[in-house]
Image (tube, grey):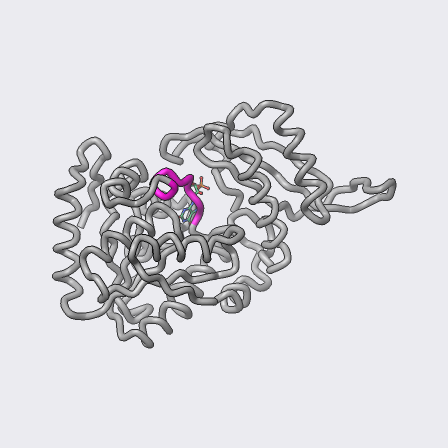
Amino acid sequence: MKLKEIPESRLNTDYFIRSKTRELAETVGDGIAINALSGGVDSSTVTVLAHRALGDRLKTYFIDNGIMREGEPQRVVLLFRKLGIPVQLLDARREFFAALKGKTDPEEKRQAITDAFYRKVFGRLVKESGARFLIHGTIYTDVEETVAGIKRQHNILAQLGIDPRRAYGYSVLEPLIELRKPAVRKLAKALGLPREIYERPPFPGPALTARVIGEATPERIEIVRKATRITEEMLSKVKAFQCLAILHEDRVTGIREGRREFGLQIEVRCWNSKDAVTASPTRLPFPLLEKLAGRLTSEVPGVVSVTYNITPKPPSTIEAV
Ligand code: XMP
């Protein structure tokens, strides 16, 4: 079946919610479905939609893969609890870091996360819960970029010729697959999600590993996690599509307390974009950049150099990996 986009302007949210909840309820029947919530717009929207369709036949998990932003797992679980949707927090940090060990190639890192997620963690969850369906927040853009060979979005299976039932033992349902981000935000709002969710800047599926060049060890993820918190804090008032901090693999000579330090480099990116397909760097005020560099070098252990990326997409991409 050829996939067709429903643009935001043509999305009738009432109709969409009615037809998708009916479809989900019919497909799952009296079985059980599971889904993974990450707290991003897509997975949050799919969680509320599927919860409306299935009630307690939907089991929602937040998988703590160790590569999320600071405090994220606890914050998201609490927010959904307040919305009346129970979410189980699952600690899978060891499995993800074991899968990432020794991997430096971007596509191999993405593949390792996909496998840890679908085969290991979900494979086990499906077995334990008896679920036959996994409900996933894949959107139109994920399919496009994967098929175009730009980046393998970690949630794309069918479009790459992977049959999840044969490969992993369960079916994947993707009710948002005809929508791009602006349409998903409109739907999220219609479903009653709070503004902090439906206006949330995008965050990549492979999480902070997309922002660590080279091996994503627990220690290096911790460094980029601290840099991310500071960057997001400092740039929170900037009107931008997405701001991020990247940890480089190369070291450079710096000076700290009068002594040579062969230290780490952080690259900051802050993007203007409509749909993430093309993007341009925002013109951040220089004093703000200087303050940010000051905080990153004094608060993140080992960082002696901070750069700001001024390249548009293309030829850059938004994330580094
Ligand atoms: P790139 O780096 O490809 O990013 O220019 C485009 C947009 O997509 C996000 N991104 C991802 N989102 N799974 C996702 O759900 C992924 O594997 C992934 N990789 C990148 C990125 O943050 C940006 O908004």
Find residue 167 and report its image quarter.
Answer: bottom left
Q: Residue at coordinates 52% horizontally, 60% vertically from top-left?
A: 66
Q: Residue at coordinates 54% horizontally, 64% vertically from top-left?
A: 97
Residue 253 placed where, x, y %?
78, 42
Taking the view exactly as shown, the residue that stands out farthest to the front is: 82
Q: Please determine whether, in this image, residue 35 is positioned above or below residue 316.
A: below
Find residue 274 and report its image quarter.
Answer: top left
In the rendered structure, the answer to whether residue 82 lies left or right of residue 26 reads right
Q: Please determine whether, in this image, residue 278 is positioned above or below residue 174.
A: above
In front here: 41 or 255? 41
Residue 147 placed where, x, y %?
33, 47
In the rendered structure, the answer to whether residue 258 lies left or right of residue 244 reads right
Q: Please determine whether, in this image, residue 314 is positioned above or below residue 176.
A: above
Residue 202 highlighted magenta (yes or no): yes
Q: Residue at coordinates 50% horizontally, 42% vertically from top-left?
A: 319
Count of numbered labels shown in the rendering: 0
Q: Quadrant of ligand 1?
A: top left
Most common SS among magenta residues: loop
In the rendered structure, the answer to whether residue 141 lies left or right of residue 255 reads left
Residue 58 placed where, x, y %?
25, 64
Q: Please determine whether, in this image, residue 272 is positioned above or below residue 193.
A: above
Magenta range:
196-204
Find residue 160 and report its image quarter.
Answer: bottom left
In the rendered structure, the answer to whether residue 321 lies left or right of residue 8 reads right
In front here: 1 or 141? 141
Residue 303 placed where, x, y %?
70, 44
Q: Residue at coordinates 58% horizontally, 36% vertically from top-left?
A: 268
Taking the view exactly as shown, the residue that stands out farthest to the right is: 258
Residue 29 highlighted magenta (yes or no): no
